[in-house]
Amino acid sequence: MCCIPGCLRLARNPHRDSCEGPGRLPARFSDSLQTDVCNGKITSTYVSLKINKYKELLMERTLSIIKPDGVQRNLIGEVVKRFEKAGIRIAAMKMLRLTKQQAMGFYKVHQERPFFESLTDFMSSGPVVVMVLEGGDVIQKNRDLMGATNYKEAAEGTIRHDFATDIEKNVVHGSDSPATAATEIAYFFSELEICR
Ligand code: CDP
Ligand code: MG
């Protein structure tokens, strides 16, 4: 739509012919931007719309879980502090206890693995804290903060290096790809529970 209040024209830039004066957008730019720019001028509304659009493109969400060992050992604050210090926004958070069935459903990608039984027993052995983390490149950022699955291989300063006691009891879970993040977030949260 045209950005002049009250103008109902669909802006295939209807005002373009009168847009060549000083302070106006050069024609080569207005060609590609003509649906967004009114009268050849970049408006502040246009700029903030564009910024929001790019922010949305860069913004990612991921699922984080503080596993039963982390909750039991009073590590909730420590883990959350690391996320916040890294500039990650917590968009949703709750504590719950998974049933064995729910843990099996969550980890069904691993159902053929030898550790599946033990892992799902562990994940249903006590309360967990589930969170939706939000930020630019947050899936990878979270994985970097967590460290390698095996705490013995995790880099210094990572959560697993600093707190894990076992390859299974490794304090935190984090989604590993955008597709997994979407499925895992939906496993725990409705869109209404995720705060903007
Ligand atoms: O959690 P992450 O994505 O780093 O590793 P995963 O390969 O997806 O495995 C999921 C979880 O299974 C791990 O975090 C461990 O708790 C557990 N696991 C295990 O008990 N023994 C293994 N050899 C590998 C994973
Ligand atoms: Mg994984």
Image: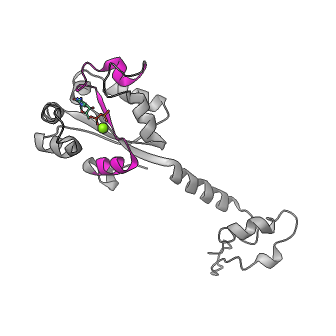
Q: Which image quarter holds the N terminus?
A: bottom right
- Quarter where residue 143 is shown: top left
Quarter for ligand 2? top left
- The reply to whether the magenta stretch includes residue 182 is yes
Q: Is residue 181 left or right of residue 7?
A: left
Residue 99, percent from left and from top: 12, 40
Q: Residue at x 67, y 78 (%)?
A: 12
Residue 158 in magenta stretch? yes
Residue depicted at x 36% and y 20% = 161
The magenta region covers 157-186
Q: Residue at x 15, y 35 (%)?
A: 124
Name the spot of residue 154 as percent of width and height, x first.
37, 22
Q: Where residue 119 appears, x then y in whole percent?
A: 17, 32
Residue 66's place in the image compared with 22, above or below, is: above
In the visual, does 181 lie left or right of 109? right
Q: Is residue 103 above or below residue 25?
A: above
